Image (cartoon, rainbow, N blue to C red):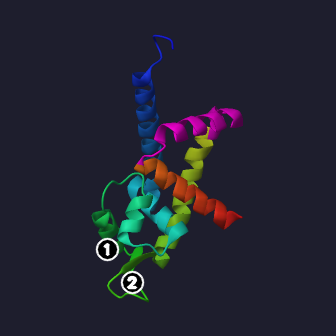
Amino acid sequence: MSATIGAGEIRLLVLAAQRHGSRMLAGYLREASVTPTQAEALQVLGGHAPLTLVELGRLLISETGSPSRLVDTLVQRGLVTREPDEVDKRVVQLRLAPAGHQVLADIQDAISIVDDFIAARLTHDEMTRLVALLRKLLHDTPGGQAIRTRIEAAQTRNA
């Protein structure tokens, strides 16, 4: 390996890419009045609901631990509902409220803009190689598992 390329540079590049993408996304999400973390929660609920708080927490990449404060905010804003489970009334299920579905459409538009930014800079082959390398890097991590679960569910829905 070259002396100028190493794990430290990779760490910094991943961090810089994440920060740039988050700032970019946050700017586009201002119109929807949601943060990137709130947008991710709404996106996950839009594709996987109903979910318990623990299940939602396992699928979030931007939030570690229990996302209870995040969900509280989304419930207070009328974007998410809490409902007792039909079988076990002690369990609370989270779903998008009608207003959450409306905001989700705006979120999807913002995400598409950021995705287009990436696609304009990398070829399909470069994206394929980068995805493979990042999957290898994140294998056996909570974030890597959350991404795998979300991608697999999306592929099942689209099949």
> Looking at numbered disc 2 in the image, what kind of residue is underneath it?
Glu
For the C terminus, the image quarter is: bottom right
**Most prominent secondary structure in the magenta stretch?**
helix
Instruction: Examine the structure image and report whether residue 121 is included in the region drawn in magenta.
Output: yes
**SS type, badge 1:** helix
Most extreme residue toward the left is: 69
Indicate which disc, 1 or 2, sits on the residue closer to the N terminus: 1
The residue segment tinted magenta is 119-141
Q: Is residue 57 above or below residue 6?
A: below
Q: Is residue 90 above or below residue 129?
A: below
Q: Residue at x 36, y 69 (%)?
A: 53
Residue located beneath label 2 in the image = 83
Most extreme residue toward the front is: 140
**Horizontal arrangement in the rendering, residue 152 relative to residue 51 (left or right):** right
- Locate residue 153: give its quadrant: bottom right
Q: Nearer the viewer, residue 29 or 43?
A: 43
- Locate residue 90: give its quadrant: bottom left
Q: Nearer the viewer, residue 55 or 113?
A: 55
**SS type, badge 2:** strand
| Residue 35 seen in the figure | no
Query: Crowding at label 1, few (<14), some or many (≥20) Cα neighbours within 10 Å?
Result: few
Residue located beneath label 1 in the image = 76
